[in-house]
Image (tube, grey):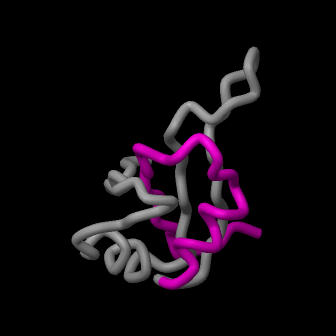
Amino acid sequence: MASTARAARLYVGNLPWTVGHRQLREYFAQFGAIQSSRVVFDRSTGLSKGYGFIEFVSPSAAADAINKQVHTLEGLNLTVQAQNN
């Protein structure tokens, strides 16, 4: 059964190549409940392409993440933007 509440999806860019799904989820969990996290990997090399997506259960949690001025993970400043579905 589908939920009537709509999850909020964010694009996260400039990810360190060492960050995977779990680390992305752990970092963004400080803003609210996470529905899913995904880092995009190159199929041929298995290395991160440097971006991913995080989906929050609550749109307000996503807004809190977007409103934070600077996101830093493993020394890199991340790009965080709303993803239009």
Does residue 32 sit above or below 27 in this rendering? below
Q: Quadrant of residue 80?
A: bottom left
Q: Residue at x 69, y 67 (%)?
A: 2
- Relative to 13, residue 2 above or below: below
The reply to whether the magenta stretch includes residue 78 is no
Residue positioned 60% across, 82% down in the render = 33
Q: Nearer the viewer, residue 52 or 35?
A: 52
Q: Looking at the image, which residue sits at the far top?
A: 44
Residue 17 figure quarter: top right
Residue 82: percent from left, percent from top: 34, 56
Q: Position of residue 73 (x, y in %)?
A: 48, 62
Q: In the rendered image, which quarter is residue 37 located in?
A: bottom right
Q: Is residue 10 left or right of residue 53?
A: left
Count of numbered marks? 0
Left/right of residue 84 with respect to residue 74 in the rendered view: left
Identify the image quadrant of the N terminus. Answer: bottom right
Camera-side residue of 12 and 71: 71
Residue at figure coordinates x 68%, y 51% from the top left:
20
Residue 46: x and y, percent?
75, 27
7 sits to left or right of 63: right
Residues shaded magenta: 1-30
Front-lying residue, 55 or 48: 48
Question: From the viewer's perspective, is residue 67 above or below residue 18?
Answer: below
Name the residue rendered at 28%, 68% in the picture. Answer: 70
> Relative to 5, is 80 on the left or the right?
left
Query: Which residue, as the protein is rendered here, is positioned at the far front?
Result: 75
